[in-house]
Amino acid sequence: MSKEIGSRVGVILSADENRIAYAGIGTYVGDFPPYGAGGMFAGFSNAEIDQCGLTNPKIELDDGNVAWGCECWWVSETAYQKILDDGRERGATLVKMDMSTCREGWHGELGAQEAGR
């Protein structure tokens, strides 16, 4: 995957033989501190991210949402279309996901885990 700033990319959240969850197409804008990201950074405060010097690929989706590299698989726009087309051909269910809703779920799960400690 080319990490050239300005590259058009597609975002896949999960995939198996029967289901593909995707977030859409967007533009890779560079690596930035992943403030508010889900996935592996869901439990990190902004201060912790800054202290560790963490950065992550940032994708600005065409729908106005942001996807971070730690939250997804991101591939070229051509590869993304092929993944979706192949899924359709084999009868997989394609599910369009909203990144802000996904992120709320990640942070909610983390809060529930922390409350159970």
Image: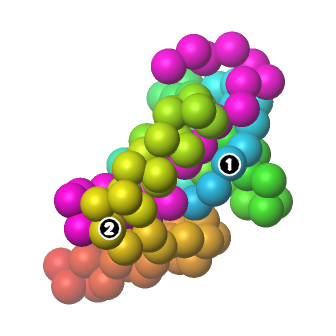
Q: Tell me residue 111's x, y (percent).
A: 38, 78
Q: Is residue 39 visible?
A: no
Relative to 96, residue 70 above or below: above
Specify the quadrant that holds the C terminus: bottom left
Residue at 32%, 67% in the rendered image: 92
Q: Quadrant of residue 33?
A: top right
Q: Tell me residue 34's x, y (percent).
A: 60, 43
Q: Give the residue type that dot 1 points to.
A: Ile
Residue highlighted by disc 1: 25
- Secondary structure of residue under mark 2: loop
Local crowd at mark 1 within 10 Å, few (<14), some, or many (≥20)? many
Observer-nearest of 7 and 68: 7
Q: Tell me residue 39's x, y (percent).
A: 40, 54
Residue at 50%, 19% in the rendered image: 1
Residue at 37%, 73% in the rendered image: 93
Q: Tell me residue 56's x, y (percent).
A: 55, 32
Q: Earlier in the sequence, mark 1 or mark 2?
A: 1
Q: Which residues are magenta?
A: 1-22
Which is more foreground, mark 1 or mark 2? 2
Q: Quadrant of residue 53?
A: top right
Observer-nearest of 1 and 78: 78
